[in-house]
Amino acid sequence: MAGNWKMYKTPAETTAFFEKFRPLVEKSEHCEIVICPPFTSLVAAVDAAKNRVRPIGPAGSVSAAVAAAVDATKGTRIRIGAQNIGWAKEGAFTGEISGPMIVAVGATYAIVGHSERRQYFNETDETVLKRTQAALEFGLTPIVCVGERLEERECGNTDAVLVGQCHKGIFGLTGQQFAKIAIAYEPVWAIGTGKTATPEIAADAHRTIRGQVREKFGKEAADAIRILYGGSVKPDNARTLMAQPEIDGVLVGGASLDPVGFASIVNF
Ligand code: PGA
């Protein structure tokens, strides 16, 4: 059950969220809980989730980053993720944040290829693959997003779009790498619009994706891959979505900003 805060919440607002959220999910052991705040609130989130342990080794070194990642499994069960990740380890890439930087602050997940990145910031399947590979290289769990736009669905192209995004993007991973990712199916027309895909529509798309995974990586990989649904998930529809066996979890935007609301989604 993952929350994507998008461009919301300062460090102080992040701390305040966790004060309320933590006790509400203290006993929630049926799922992994991941919160993805903006980069500038990652430290506050890791601290508030009590995942933080000081990195060992010279600051910024990969060994320090890996040590921090290992230690980030301590504390509460809430894990923290970034909303994007640069594909290089470091370098002249103004505005980018690298895997080792994310790991060094104690985050353990990274969303990759969110439709807002694809739509407004020219993210492509090729860069999605590179960012996913970077996340894996530095020990982060990538949550890789795919999904069709409204006009693509209306033309009957949903399956073709999903298949294309998989083949040009994440199917460039090795089988071993693929086993470590999660996929989020997020129909673009359902994001932030209040129009949730019906559980059946979502499950259909998940079946398409899983079928492709089966062809490419085999049955075991298809059974094991976690596919989350995202797009206007709210406290009142989480349960019917999660009732679909194809839906392994949810990626929640707007409704993850409210601690009580997101806790009720987690505890659907
Ligand atoms: P939403 O966003 O829940 O606000 O529709 C979902 C997402 O973009 O991950």
Image (cartoon, rainbow, N blue to C red):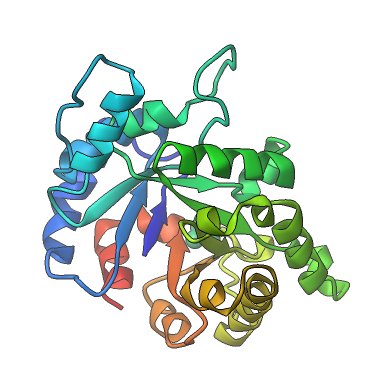
Instruction: Identify the residue at horizontal 26%, vertical 25% (top origin).
Output: 64
How many numbered marks have been drawn onto this rendered protein structure? 0
Image: 134 above or below 27:
above
Q: Nearer the viewer, residue 9 or 206?
A: 206
Residue 170 in view here = yes
Q: Quadrant of the N terminus?
A: bottom left
Instruction: Identify the residue at horizontal 49%, vertical 57% (top origin).
Output: 181
The image position of residue 47, as x and y in percent, is 17, 37
Instruction: Identify the residue at horizontal 18%, vertical 43% (top origin).
Output: 51
Kindly give the residue lying farthest to the right in the view shown: 155
The image quarter containing residue 70 is: top left
Q: Quadrant of the C terminus?
A: bottom left
Image: 208 above or below 131:
below
The image quarter containing residue 127 is: top right
Instruction: Identify the residue at horizontal 15%, vertical 64% (top origin).
Output: 24
Q: Nearer the viewer, residue 91 or 63?
A: 63
Residue 13 in view here = no
Q: Nearer the viewer, residue 141 or 221?
A: 221
Relative placement, left or right, of 108 versus 93 is left
The image position of residue 48, as x and y in percent, is 17, 41
The image quarter containing residue 82 is: top left
The image position of residue 66, as x and y in percent, is 30, 33
Relative placement, left or right, of 248 versus 113 is left
Image: 79 above or below 198:
above
Relative placement, left or right, of 234 versus 146 is left
